[in-house]
Amino acid sequence: EVFYIRKDLFYMNDNRSKNQPRVRNFPLEQTEEKGPGRAAKGGRNKEELLREMGNRLRQIRLEKNWTQDKMAECLGITKAFYGKIERGESSIALEKLALLNETMDIDLNYLITGETIPVLPINFQDVPREKRYSMEQLIKYAVSLASSKEE
């Protein structure tokens, strides 16, 4: 089991199966829900979001010294379609986003929102077995304290 702690979220990833990890989310603070039809963060429309995401994808590709041909091949799409994604003219399918994350280790949160969220991974494999339960309980207690402060 690996626990991840972010500023706004605590989650546990049980990697028993590499294909289907079990993830439990524990929100640390409530977020305002957006109803249907509401604008995305900052009031940006779909075209702007696609363009921004395409620019970030281009930046990541260039930092890794990959060509558009190599990216398109990796994703199983044509170079022309990949170019449209980078220009923000087309959206990328969810399974292709997952493939980007797996093959290039791209932070999808950054790719989509432009924000990086610091994560503190705690790998319980490195912790002596007799201390794992105590650590898990401490983390759960900290999460419950953070959640109860809003009540």
Image (tube, rainbow, N blue to C red):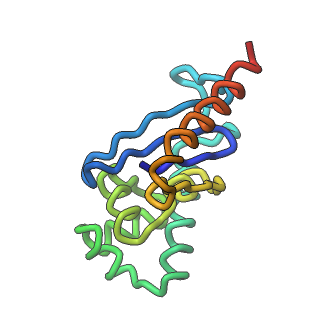
Query: Which residue is most to the top?
Result: 151
Query: Which residue is most to the front?
Result: 130
Write the residue at 61% across / 38% down.
139
**Residue 138: x, y in percent?**
62, 36
Write the residue at 35% across / 70% down.
103
**Residue 126: x, y in percent?**
49, 61
Residue 132 versus residue 52 in the image, above or below: above
- For the C terminus, the quadrant is top right
**Residue 8: x, y in percent?**
66, 38
Write the residue at 75% across / 18% down.
150
Residue 117 visible here: yes
Q: Nearer the viewer, residue 74 or 7?
A: 7
**Residue 107: x, y in percent?**
51, 60
Q: Nearer the viewer, residue 124 or 47?
A: 124
From the viewer's perspective, is 13 left or right of 151?
left
Write the residue at 56% across / 56% down.
121
From the viewer's perspective, is 72 left or right of 33?
left
Residue 115 visible here: no
Query: Which residue is most to the bottom?
Result: 65
